Image (spheres, rainbow, N blue to C red):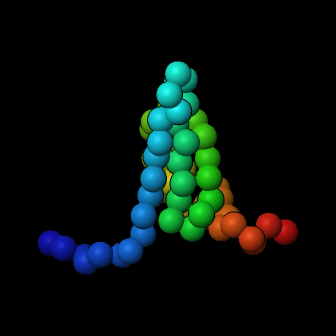
Amino acid sequence: MSTGATGEIYRIDWLPGTDVLHGTCHCGAEHSAQDPVEMWEWMLGHPEGHEPRGNAS
């Protein structure tokens, strides 16, 4: 079963020389973590846990 493309892009980069992963959500929010599971939970938990850029209160 296919649900079709959403246009959402999630990006995770490894920071060379470290154990740190840096993630960027489709909304522009960013997060760094050493644990890949933590990183994916943060990304897939959208929007809980992060806000799009420019929406800080």
Residue 34, quarter of picture? top right
Q: Is residue 21 above or below residue 3?
A: above
Q: Residue at x 61, y 47 (%)?
A: 31
Which quadrant of the view contains residue 52? bottom right
Horizontal and vertical percent position of residue 29: 62, 59
| Above or below 20: residue 25 | below
Q: Residue furthest left?
A: 1
The total number of labels drawn is 0
Q: Is residue 38 visible?
A: no
Residue visible at 25% across and 77% down in the picture: 4
Of residues 14 and 34, the one nearer the viewer is: 14
Position of 18 with respect to 54 (left or right) is left
Residue 9 sits above or below residue 19 on the image: below
In the figure, residue 20 lies in which quadrant?
top right
- Percent x, y for residue 28? 59, 63
Q: Can residue 15 be seen from the camera position used here?
A: yes
Q: Residue furthest front?
A: 16
Residue, x 50% and y 65% (percent of image)? 26
Q: Which residue: 55% across, 23% down?
A: 18
Depth check: give the residue in front, 38 or 9. 9
Give how far across and how far down residue 55 sits, in percent: 75, 72
Residue 57: x and y in percent read 84, 69
The N terminus lies in which quarter of the figure? bottom left
Q: Residue furthest top?
A: 17
Horizontal side of residue 28 vs 36, given as left or right: right
